[in-house]
Amino acid sequence: MLSIRAVTDPSDPAIAAFGALQERAYFEPDMLIPAPYIAHMLARPGGARRDTLLVAEDERGRVLGGTLFHYLPDAGTGFSSFLGVEADARGRGVARALNAARRETLQGQGAAGVFIDVVNPERLSDEQRAAEAAVGSDPRSRRASFHALGFRTVDVRYEQPVGGEDGGPVTDMDLLYQPFTDEQGSVPAALVSETMRAYWTPWLGAVRAAQHAQELQDRAGGRERVPLLPATASPSAFQR
């Protein structure tokens, strides 16, 4: 029997279990939010970013999967930092149940949808592909899974401001969006940039976050709405 619950106590052992799950499931552990910092985030609820950790547990209390995400009141949207499932629990509907619970939580907070950033298999190095294989994951399957969950690729070139080579931007990821409304074909460019400004501000500070959000808006090329493509597709800027 599968149960999903929100972790609210910063001393809950499920936080450490989720942190360990992240490291087993993802090929670049340095890109993840570590368990001690997640506990710190949950100890400070409210504010400009409302953090939630949901875990899926079996009847013995073992953590089979989890998702860490954030409601951003200034943008009226959510951003999901991670969703993962233990290898031996995959194919049992855990990810779909977590996705549904995340959506229900964010909709209850007033979010219009949720964004995630996901690696693009076409832009991974041979070393990164080998690291993916070593943890039993496949970037193409991951994108297909997110498409099945309702996510779509935002048609704009996306850069995570820090974490790349020599401290520069990460350029091998795309931004995906799951709308909670009937508007499935596009998303307002202003919503994209405002979401990322709100998400980046606690990490980068207000000035740098606003700068990078404006750069993202500029890469939309003046479009008021940005098309949403299949989650398995790359943004059009990479298809030329």
Image (cartoon, grey):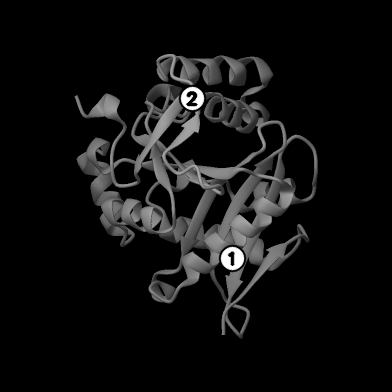
Residue 218 rendering spot, x and y as whole percentages: 45, 14
**Relative to residue 237, is residue 92 depicted above or below?**
below
Q: Which residue is mark 1?
A: 17
Of badges 1 and 2, the one in the foreground is: 2
Q: Is residue 64 visible?
A: yes
At label 1, the amino acid type is Ala
- Give the residue furthest to the front: 182
The residue at 65%/66% (across/down) is 14
Residue 114 rendering spot, x and y as whole percentages: 55, 45
Secondary structure of the residue carrying tag 1 is helix
Q: Which of the 4 image quadrants contains residue 89?
A: bottom left
210 or 164, which lies in front? 210
Q: Which of the 4 image quadrants contains residue 197?
A: top right
186 or 20, which lies in front? 186
Is 220 left or right of 126, judged from the image as shown? right
Q: Which of the 4 image quadrants contains residue 207?
A: top right
**Relative to residue 231, is residue 55 depicted above or below?**
below
The residue at 68%/19% (across/down) is 206
Q: How many residues crowd mark 1 within 10 Å: few (<14), some (14–19), many (20+)? A: some
At label 2, the amino acid type is Pro
38 or 67, which lies in front? 67
- Quarter of the figure with the C terminus: top left
**Relative to residue 240, is residue 179 depicted above or below?**
below
- Quarter of the figure with the N terminus: bottom right
The residue at 40%/44% (across/down) is 152
Q: Nearer the N terminus, badge 1 or badge 2?
A: 1
Q: Which residue is mark 2?
A: 161
Is 146 left or right of 144, judged from the image as shown? right
The residue at 62%/53% (across/down) is 35
